[in-house]
Amino acid sequence: MRIKSMSRLNLNAGVLLVSLLTMTSSVFADEAAITLLNRMNQSLHELSYKGTLAYVRGEVLSTLRIEHTVVNGVENETVVRLNEKGSKVSRELKGFSLASIPRISPEMGKVYSFDLGRTNRVANLPCVIVTARPKDRERYLQKYCINKETGMLLDYVLVGKSHKPVERFMFTTINIASASGKSKIEQATSGKVKTTVVIADAKNSSRNAKQLKLPDLGDGWVVDSLPKGYAIRRAPNVHDKGGKTKHYIVSDGLSSLSVFVSPYSKDEPANNVVVNSGALNVLSQRKNDFVVTVVGEVPESTLKNILNNIRRK
């Protein structure tokens, strides 16, 4: 009996030790993952880089050429869509910017877990996979493959509820330089990149957003509830013809969507509108004499939840 008891105690102690080691390694992995993600965020603003990447949204594949420069602390970014032969088919692709990826804050740990994965190679450079794994079904899983030497993001995947990628971009060629212009890593690029269009600095607009206390949005609108982790921020003014459209940003810090409230006009469809394009979902609903539209790269069910809880006072 004593031998059996001792064996049982040794077994229990072994299980406890393994559990403690697993928990400790998980904490270290989370901290290392968050540190690398925040270094990536800093690098995307401080590095000058140019290259070609494959961009997939849903079943649509595009080839993009991106150039990001930093001169005297000022960021300029140009994104151009290419055709199959590598020449331009449009001057600028709006709405796509690596510099818009946010920093990781402690609050995000309530709705995401972060962990380091295996090492991969993208554009002939090594990178480490970091996964931002949602703790509920109100947001998508995100994977980043980051070059440790430069902190540069080389591959990004947004994974839907069916465990299949709904959006992805991956560099095929890239040239990375520091803010001073000194080359750190060089890879062959197909042709020269011409800087023709400058887009706004997405970092500044997010920093200037004002936090609003729930549930009052202002302007006569309230929200009854939001999914855990999400908060509402007032976005920069929308420049429409009448100046009557209100724009709000709902974000958990990593995933975000926009809410537009505009007066209803007879030219707009009376029925609710639903649009799906890869990770991007759009829902629109008439509420009283207004049309409320929610747009974002979050699950459609999350948009429905938020849309149903926004009402006129």
Image: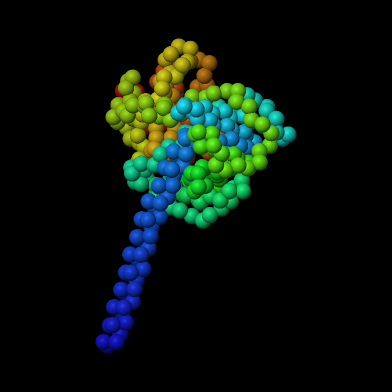
Tell me residue 296's x, y (percent). 48, 33
Q: Residue furthest right?
A: 85
Residue drawn at the location 33% of the way across and 64% of the way down: 20
Does the image show residue 205? yes
Res 9 quadrant in image:
bottom left
Q: Position of residue 126 (x, y in %)?
A: 56, 51
User: Residue 213 falls in which quadrant of the image?
Assistant: top left
The residue furthest left is 2
Q: Nearer the viewer, residue 142 or 70?
A: 70
| Relative to 232, 64 lies left or right | right
Q: Indicate left or right for 48 with 308 as reference.
A: right
Q: Tell me the residue at 44%/24% (across/down).
A: 260
Q: x, y (%) of residue 64?
A: 62, 34
Left or right of 218? Residue 259 is: right
Q: Which quarter shows the N terminus?
A: bottom left
**Image quarter of the C terminus:** top left
Q: Residue furthest top?
A: 242
Q: Which of 92 and 233 lies nearest the eye of the viewer?
A: 92
Instruction: Work out whether residue 32 or residue 213 is closer to the camera in this orientation and state it.
Output: 32
Q: Residue at x 39, y 32 (%)?
A: 250
In the rendered image, the vertical position of residue 268 relative to residue 28, given as above or below:
above
Residue at 26%, 87% in the rendered image: 2
Place of residue 237 in the rendered image (x, y in percent of width and height, measured from the top left): 41, 19
Relative height, residue 300 to residue 10 (above, below): above
